Amino acid sequence: MIVISNGQAISQVSKFKLCYAVCCLGWAICGFAIGQIRTLQKFGWLANVAVWINLMLMSISMGAIANSPPNYGVAAFGSAGATTVPDDVTPVNGVYPPVKHYAGLPDPSNFIGSVNGLMQGVAAYGGAQLFVEFMAEMRRPRDFIKAMWSAQAFIYFMYMLYGLLCYSYQGQYVYSLAYLGVSPYGWRSVGNMLAVLSGIIAAALYGNIGIKVLYNNIFMDLFSAPPLTTKQGKYLWAAIVPIYWSIAYTVAAAIPDFFGLVSVLAAFCVVQFSYTFPPMLALGYAIHKGAMQEGEGFDPDTGNTIHHDSGMRRWVRGFFNGPWYFSVLNVIYAAASLATAGLGAYAAILGMINAFKLPQVNAFSCRSPLDSS
């Protein structure tokens, strides 16, 4: 998402004179360099700067949107036809329809559009499992709860303010990345450059955490990779980083539809890690804990774990001793998340099919998807 959003920003600033695939490639190369940083210890002040850059970007784009017409050129591509009624964004004799607002979905019969809209919300508030990784890097982990809830309240307020204001002025023409929907080139370029700065910091933070999770939980646990503190671990880290960012570039260049990409990632990844896996893990823990009997447990002298029984009988006992109503709720929660993910994947794929019908949406193309000319 970082590669594609900033690739589109650079292509828009260059007035589409720079090859779009190259715009995205530049971010992958940037990731090669910043990904070599292995610790988040020095990133505290940088992350704080990123927050203020984003607030500045939001303020500037809201001011520009409130005092200028929508950027009609990207309107049809904004949701790739998934939620927008085509007639509402199609010019007649060179004149675009007036701004419209809807209390619900523009096309109530468009089930795909409603599910894709849900996936945007999932993507916006997903990724909660990364909080655990950030907490592991903090000097005083108990401060994490205060920091998390303060941040969530602040983010929610700003999201609502930004979204409602942009939609109130641009209606059906609003773009998923609202600063790309600013019509004056100067203000749009300012927003794009601020987004690029913020994107560099985000790439460093999320790339670092992503590769670290991959390295610690897969390479070290499953393949006995050396610790990152060793010379061999540093070399292996340096080799993994380009592969990681090359995959990100391949996905971004192959799927230039930002709205569709967010829906796909939300359905296949974010829903699972934020909503499906946590209740499954909680259920597994509750079953293990509830199944324990007197005299069972880990024996530090022998290094063995003592179980008096095994099999389905133990699982059933653990399920109902969990206590049972928490176990039932976790099952329902996980099943509902899987159902939502399935619907999201279905809607995202159909939305992508619609997106690639647009002439400017092509994989690994020099033509920017924002270029409607």
Image: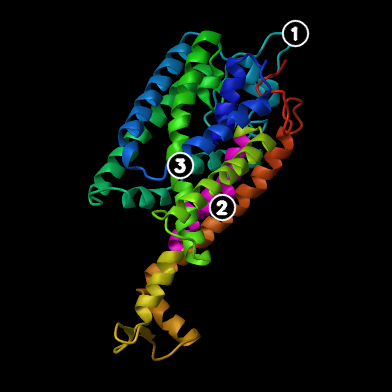
Question: Helix, strand, or loop for circle 2?
Answer: helix
For residue 302, say whether it is visible: yes
Label 3 vs label 2, nearer the camera: 3
Place of residue 105 in the rendered image (x, y in percent of width and height, measured from the top left): 58, 33
Q: For mark 1, does the 10 Å Cα neighbourhood hold few (<14), some (14 to 19), or many (20 or more) residues? A: few
Instruction: Name the residue that disc number 2 marks.
Output: 340
Work out how far the residue at label 1 is from the one at label 2, CA to CA, in angstroms.
42 Å
Instruction: Name the residue that disc number 1 marks.
Output: 93
Place of residue 224 in the rendered image (x, y in percent of width and height, measured from the top left): 49, 65
Instruction: From this view, report whether residue 83 is shown above or below residue 56.
Output: below
Question: Helix, strand, or loop for circle 3?
Answer: helix
Label 3 vs label 1, nearer the camera: 3
Looking at the image, which is closer to me, 300 or 349?
300
- Whether the magenta-drawn stretch holds residue 50 is answered as no
Q: Quadrant of residue 290?
A: bottom left
Circles 3 and 1, Cβ within 8 Å, touching? The answer is: no
Question: Helix, strand, or loop for circle 1?
Answer: loop
Tell me where the magenta segment starts and ends, as one range: 259-279
Instruction: Name the residue that disc number 3 marks.
Output: 206
Give the total of numbered labels.
Answer: 3
Q: For mark 3, does the 10 Å Cα neighbourhood hold few (<14), some (14 to 19), or many (20 or more) residues? A: some
- Whether the magenta-drawn stretch holds residue 277 is answered as yes
Place of residue 278 in the rendered image (x, y in percent of width and height, measured from the top left): 44, 59
Q: Mark 1 or 2 closer to N-term?
A: 1
